[in-house]
Amino acid sequence: QVQLVESGGGLVQAGGSLRLSCVASGTIFRLNVMGWYRQAPGKQRELVATITVSGASTNYADSVKGRFTVSRDNAKNTVYLQMNSLKPEDTAVYYCHVLFSDYWGQGTQVTVSS
């Protein structure tokens, strides 16, 4: 049974920062590309960032490039999303995901006030 547990969400003012964490159980984490997605009310879930197994390669949505940084610690089975210069349009539920699998976390709410 694979479990993904996100944390670190909250309410922050525009221009502020948050760091999300996602802890994964099992060995699947160390063998797979990980991703962060988000879903705002009334909108489809969208890809925010991905990171390869080694962490050497990352990919970002255009809307977050230069502001968000994805990283991982395979020894801790954890993937992070550092979010800086937050904007109200970043408000969403953020999910971590094991790419090419059915494994998703429960999500953590990020709310950015203007």
Image (cartoon, rainbow, N blue to C red):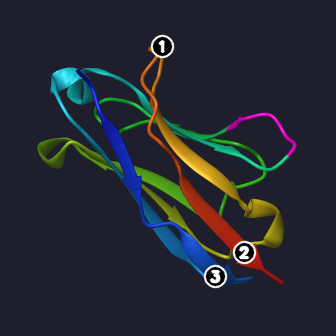
User: Can see residue 28?
Assistant: yes
In the rendered image, which residue does mark 3 sit on?
Answer: 12
Q: Dividing the image into 4 quarters, which one contains the N terminus?
A: top left
Residue 21 x/y as whole percent: 37, 57
Q: Which SS class for mark 1? A: loop
Query: Of the residues shown, which amino acid type is indicated by label 3?
Result: Val
- How many marks can you see? 3
Query: Within 10 Å of the Cα at label 3, are there few (<14), some (14-19), or many (20+) other Cα atoms?
Result: some
Residues at circles 3 and 2 in contact by the CB criterion of under 8 Å: yes
Residues at circles 3 and 1 in contact by the CB criterion of under 8 Å: no
Q: Nearer the viewer, residue 12 or 54?
A: 12
- Residue at horizontal 78 percent and vertical 52 percent from the top: 63
In the rendered image, which residue does mark 1 sit on?
Answer: 100
Query: Of the residues shown, which amino acid type is indicated by label 1?
Result: Phe
In this picture, which residue range is highlighted in magenta?
42-46
In the rendered image, which residue does mark 2 sit on?
Answer: 112
Query: Of the residues shown, which amino acid type is indicated by label 2?
Result: Val
Q: Main secondary structure of the magenta part?
A: loop
Q: Nearer the viewer, residue 81 or 102?
A: 102
Compared across the picture, whether 24 is left or right of 43 comes to left
